[in-house]
Image (cartoon, helix red, strand yellow):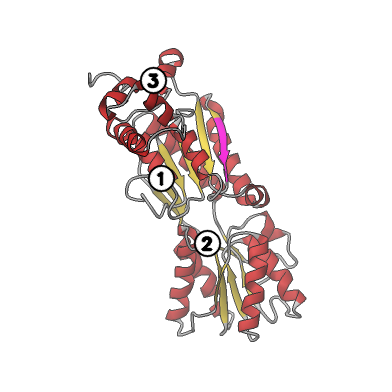
Amino acid sequence: MDGRRSPTLEDVAARAGVSRATASRVVNGDPRVRESAREAVTAAIAELGYRPNRAARSLVVREPDSVAVLVHEPDERIFADPFFGGLLRGVGQRLAPTGLQMVLVMGDPVRDGARMERYLRGGHTDGVIVVSAHRGDGLVAALTETRLPTVFVGRPLTGADTFVYVDVDNCEGGRLAARRLVERGCHRIGTVTGPLDMAAGIDRHQGWSEELAAAGLPTDLVEVGDFTAEGGARAVRALLERAPDLDGLFVASDLMAAAAMSELVAAGRRVPEDVALVGFDASAAAGMTRPPLTTVTNPVSEMAVRATELLLRLMRREEAASEVLPTRLVPGGTA
């Protein structure tokens, strides 16, 4: 193949040893293809760096026209969590002067994974911002194979050495939350983590655990949450059953923390007099509780803008490096 031109579908078919029609069916996700042929075509796509539809489109358009924001979460979480609204605003603001269209691609990690992978392999977009990546996502393999310019918001657990990402210092944020509770004199401090198949959930828990261990306090009062209000409420009820004498609580998102506060009050526990509470995100949810949450900043709009800027650099074939933004404690009335 001439190294000066982009690989074509014919090149893929020739490398895979199949017909052009078979290669096209694989690219378009047609299930009526033998597994051996599918594997051969997939390998050829990865080897040649073929991007379906992009080469032909670029001859006409001459420039990129869209960026996909890919969110691997159920719809109900995306629309309920203010984190995602702040992120989309940040991406949209940065893309506004460029003429690029933002396309939102979202779906449940279990139910919609295959559909989202087909979208990425179908050549429908020129760059991708991935939000809320989970361990084991097939999307990482699809992004690797297509070689689409990609930036993650949040460190991916798979591919962190390969992909560019923008994250907040979640580990330090967990330490700040735990330190606040220790300084208030709490001794039975629990936590509701985020999902432990995501870097944010793992790192916030790690920072909390390290700070408590340094203070000589136990680190066994842990319940795993899912960044939803329902998950936060469920986890706090479980913690109270295990530790009726709980006097400090770090909840790994404001949305979960607001729900946790309601559960504590329902159980007859005053906040902060009986249980001091710290959230994470410094989102709109933190100001909606009474008293307002003490929380840890998660500069989502800034992360979104930085991720978009890095993606634009990659799309121009310029170098870009991952970034980790600092965080800080925002005092409120709960701790």
Q: Is residue 166 visible?
A: yes
Residue designated by label 1: 140
x, y percentage for residue 143? 40, 39
Residue at the (51%, 50%) spot, across then down: 132
Q: Is residue 261 magenta?
A: no
Q: What is the distance, in whole Å, between disc 2 and disc 1 at their CAs?
A: 18 Å
Q: Secondary structure at mark 1?
A: helix
The residue that appears at 38% across and 26% down in the rendered structure is 22
Q: Quadrant of residue 23?
A: top left
Say left or right for 268 vs 76.
Answer: right
Q: Amino acid at mark 1?
A: Val
Q: How many residues crowd mark 2 within 10 Å: few (<14), some (14–19), many (20+)?
A: some
- CA distance for labels 1 and 3: 22 Å
Give the answer, above or below, for where 196 lies relative to 44.
Answer: below
Q: Are marks 2 and 1 in contact (CB under 8 Å)?
A: no
**Which numbered dot is residue 55?**
3
- Closer-to-camera residue (160/328): 160
Name the amino acid, label 3. Answer: Ala
For disc 2, the marked residue is 195
